[in-house]
Image (cartoon, rainbow, N blue to C red):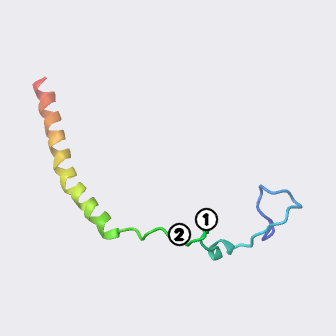
Amino acid sequence: MAEGSGGPWTSPGAQVSAQPGDSNRAGPVDLAGGEHRVPAFPVERAERGIQLVSRFAGPAIFFLVLGGLVWLLVN
């Protein structure tokens, strides 16, 4: 397939409007006349949340497995 042909999903005579690499030049979409930005992802907060969940997940799984084994032995 020739470079810039548009891929296998376009007809042979179709013109490609964007060249490879154009997607990284696109700016933000202005919907209401102002600039809308997504706030930065709070990585530190996410890491603390993952640590908190993992701190309780290990013992919870341990006690669930231990309880399941006791339940199997009793029944």
Give how far across and how far down residue 59 sits, in percent.
Answer: 16, 49
**Amino acid type shown at disc 1:** Leu
Residue depicted at x 48% and y 67%: 38
Residue labelled with disc 1 = 31
Give the number of callouts.
2
Going 10% across and 25% down the picture, which residue do you hit? 74
Label 2 close to label 1 by CB (< 8 Å): yes
> From the image, which quarter does the N terminus lie in?
bottom right
Dot 2 or dot 1: first in sequence order is 1
Identify which residue, 41 or 59, lies in the foreground: 41
Q: Which residue is farthest front?
A: 33
Q: Please name the residue shown 30% across and 70% down the image.
A: 44
Say which quarter of the image contains residue 10.
bottom right
Amino acid bearing label 2? His
Q: Which residue ends up furthest to the top in the rendered image? A: 75
Would you name the residue on which mark 2 appears?
36
Q: Give me the residue at 18% from left, 52% from top.
A: 56
Residue 75 image point, x, y percent: 13, 23
75 is higher (above) or lower (below) than 45: above
Q: Name the image quarter holding residue 40.
A: bottom left
Separation (CA) of disc 2 from disc 1 = 8 Å
71 lies above or below 64: above
Q: Position of residue 41 (x, y in %)?
A: 40, 68
Element under disc 2: loop
The percent position of residue 29, horizontal first and vertical second, equals 61, 68
Query: Is residue 7 toward the left or the right of residue 63 in the image?
Result: right
Q: Residue furthest right?
A: 13
Q: Is residue 60 left or right of residue 45?
A: left
Task: Give the quarter of the image for residue 64.
Answer: top left
